[in-house]
Amino acid sequence: MSAPAASEGLVLVVDDDPGTRKVAKANLSLEGFEVLVASSGAEALARLDESDPLAVVSDLKMPDLDGIALMDRVHAIRPSLPVVLVTAHATVETAVEAMRKGALHYLTKPIRYDELALVLRHAVAHERQRRDVARLRGELEQAAGFEEIVGTSPAMREVFSMVEQVADADATVLLRGETGTGKELVARAIHRRSARRDRTFVAVNCTAIPRDLMESEFFGHEKGAFTGAVARRIGRFEQAHGSTLFLDEVGDLDLAIQAKLLRVLQEQELTRVGAQDAIRVDVRIVAATNRDLEALVREGRFRDDLYYRLNVIPIRLPPLRERTGDLPALMEHFLGSFAKRYGRGAPLPPPDVIAAARAYPWPGNVRELRNLCERAVLMGWAAIAPILGAGPRADAFGAAALVDPSLPLLEAKQRLVERFEREYLTRLLKEHRGRVGEVARAAGIAERNLYEKMKAYGLSRDDYR
């Protein structure tokens, strides 16, 4: 049975008038789009931090950021994202300025939603094509498979050997390892070296899906299947048909979805929520977890039959503290990558930093090392040394930034505050595994403020999941 058509795509609508937002969401949903709304430019930017729309529709006149200013901010973050501007006060001058500044299209109120839907369909199709080209280019550049996995230690050579042996089979692989050890990189290497390499690799973070949306996320749903199901949705299994589906943090799955997942793995077929007929799927599963699945099975929190179905080919990824011999090569790789990205020199780590790095326990593993190398490129090793235990130490976290007495008092104080905030938020993100809402509540600040600070400090929630 052929799979039905997917959603037209996710779009973001920005307007300070609640009535306009409501009508726009209703009409565009009827046209088959998934719709996010924002009441201001600031809220729209926050939405972009937490979602991935294929186009933006914005009112031109808004109190905080007008549509053109918002478009400039959007394009600074995502240069190619299509933006459609809407206004009730159209003039030739504003239309010309909007198009000159990079707007895809310019519409006047009252909006004709059939016209807007047509514009958005073209915009979304073009953006999907652009992303596909970028993805394929990236995959071609890494066609050999192991470029992003750096290491020559015996433990990593064993991982490479296992990947070589199992990649071209369709057997299910279970990657075991602590957070930040590179499980997704290994999953992608398995896919790139398999017969399924020409199909899109599909990854899903099981901890990032709300419990009541898991079935729809995995298996899809039909229009009208439940409140809010305004269009048919193609689930991750259908998206991965003929390819590889990576289930990250599979140990966090709810028991109810585990049973349904097991059936799909056994029968190789699924039924969308609200549908009657089953759909055949051909999917190769690579799962990953940092949890003790055997303990979860004993506690009744993970199905033993699903465990055995997933644990066909187990591959253990060693924590960084067990392969400190790889540290110099990893540092060189990350420093070179970030130096190229930011157009700066790659600062060589001083001997005391390398020695401290070898003794440091690396609770965040390779991901933590990557983040510190990025910070070193931007701020120098003086900002990194105290974290590793090299150089002077102070404060309750044992990782104070160095105080530079050559700076004016206010500037030195500001730098110290920034370094404290960065370390404080880093620790909360680790503790709450990247769940931004929980971090904001723990820190006692608004999510919007937290997103702004994370962006300023180069922190991404995805690095802590």
Image (cartoon, helix red, strand yellow):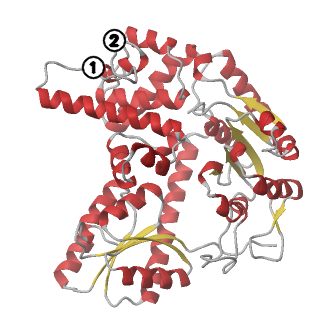
Q: Earlier in the sequence, mark 1 or mark 2?
A: 2
Q: Name the residue: 70% across, 57% down.
A: 240
Q: Give the image location of residue 53, x and y in percent.
A: 47, 64
Q: Give the image location of residue 277, x and y in percent.
A: 83, 75
Evaluate if marks 1 and 2 touch, with contact meaning CB atoms under 8 Å apart. yes
Secondary structure of the residue carrying numbered label 1: loop
Disc marking residue 28? none
Q: Nearer the viewer, residue 347 or 246?
A: 246
Q: Is residue 38 left or right of residue 26?
A: left
The residue carrying mark 1 is 402
Q: Nearer the viewer, residue 104 or 315?
A: 315
Q: Name the residue: 77% across, 49% down.
A: 284
Q: Image quarter for residue 151?
A: top right
Residue projecting furthest to the left: 408
The residue type indicated by label 2 comes to: Gly
Q: Name the residue: 70% across, 60% down.
A: 218
Disc marking residue 391? 2
